[in-house]
Image (cartoon, grey):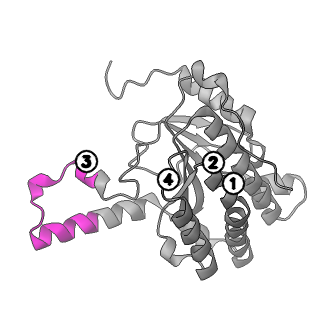
Amino acid sequence: MIKSFFKDKTKEEDVLNVPEHIAIIMDGNGRWAKKRNMPRNMGHKAGGENVKTITKACDKLGVKYLTLYAFSTENWKRPEEEVSGLMDLLVFFLKSELKELHENHVRIRTIGDISHLPKKTKQVLDDSIEVTKNNTGLNLVLALNYGSRNEITLAVKAIGSKLKDGSLDLDDINEDLIAEHLDTADMPDPDLMIRTSGELRLSNYMLWQLAYSEFYFTDVYWPDFGEEALMEAVKVYSNRQRRFGAV
């Protein structure tokens, strides 16, 4: 039986500066499994279970956007069995959790080129997006077949095409215009970026959008990064001063 992962809102929002948008690089599933002498896909399964835990925690806190780096453009290089397992896991998550997500007003969204996902995966994903498109609660944004350099390249091409056909002038190009051509056009930039498992890099994740985000790195593997760990990250974020280049 799947546990309900939506309960009464926590009172922590009264004392914390809660980020509007949290972006997470969910790293360490494979190492979590290896440490337990399990196949890598068992680590991904445990990581999938933790998506529910963190979605619940973010909903309780009042976070408006939770963006999860679920599958990068580089992940296609992994063994076929592992890629297939990840796609099956996504399908299972959406099918098993959609009803409750929808009942709790969560809106499922994506960034990245989902047209290249397997047909079954894309169909389930499209259905989930359609069902929840009018929800006004937490935006659960799945970065799938996503790579920031590819995203920026496509934005440059789109702007270049408009320059070529005369619908844009060179002087029209500014930061706002570029942002409007990114996958996150109608989303606020992340306030807090979390990466689990001890790695200290961005791995081609939201390079434009993270320009002034606060970074939080932890040695904890993603399957073990539960609600308590998230709260610690938010507390650290709350104690930082965001100057955005000012004094």
Say which mark, if any, is on residue 109: none
Say which mark, if any, is on residue 104: 2
Contact? badges 2 and 1 (CB < 8 Å): yes
At 37% from the left edge and 51% from the top edge, which residue is drawn? 186
Q: How far apart are the alpha carbons under marks 4 and 3?
A: 19 Å
The stretch of residues the image draws in magenta is 156-178
User: In this picture, is 177 found above or below 123?
Assistant: above
Say which mark, if any, is on residue 100: 1
At 41% from the left edge and 65% from the top edge, which residue is drawn? 150
Residue at which label 4 appears: 205
Amino acid at circle 1: Glu
Amino acid at circle 2: Asn
Relative to the observer, which residue lies in front, 208 or 97? Answer: 97
Residue depth check, mark 3 versus mark 2: number of the one nearer the observer: 2
Quadrant position of residue 86: bottom right
Amino acid at circle 3: Asp
Contact? badges 1 and 3 (CB < 8 Å): no
Disc on the earlier residue, 4 or 2: 2
Image location (x, y in percent) of residue 62: 57, 34
Secondary structure beneath disc 2?
loop
Q: How far apart are the alpha carbons under marks 1 and 3?
A: 36 Å
Residue depth check, mark 4 versus mark 3: number of the one nearer the observer: 3
Q: Is residue 172 magenta?
A: yes
Image location (x, y in percent) of residue 247: 33, 18
Q: How far apart are the alpha carbons under marks 2 and 1?
A: 6 Å
Secondary structure beneath disc 3?
helix
At 31% from the left edge and 63% from the top edge, which residue is drawn? 155
Q: How far apart are the alpha carbons under marks 3 and 2?
A: 33 Å
Disc on the earlier residue, 3 or 2: 2
Q: Is residue 17 left or right of residue 4?
A: left
User: In this picture, is 87 found above or below 65?
Assistant: below
Residue at which label 3 appears: 176
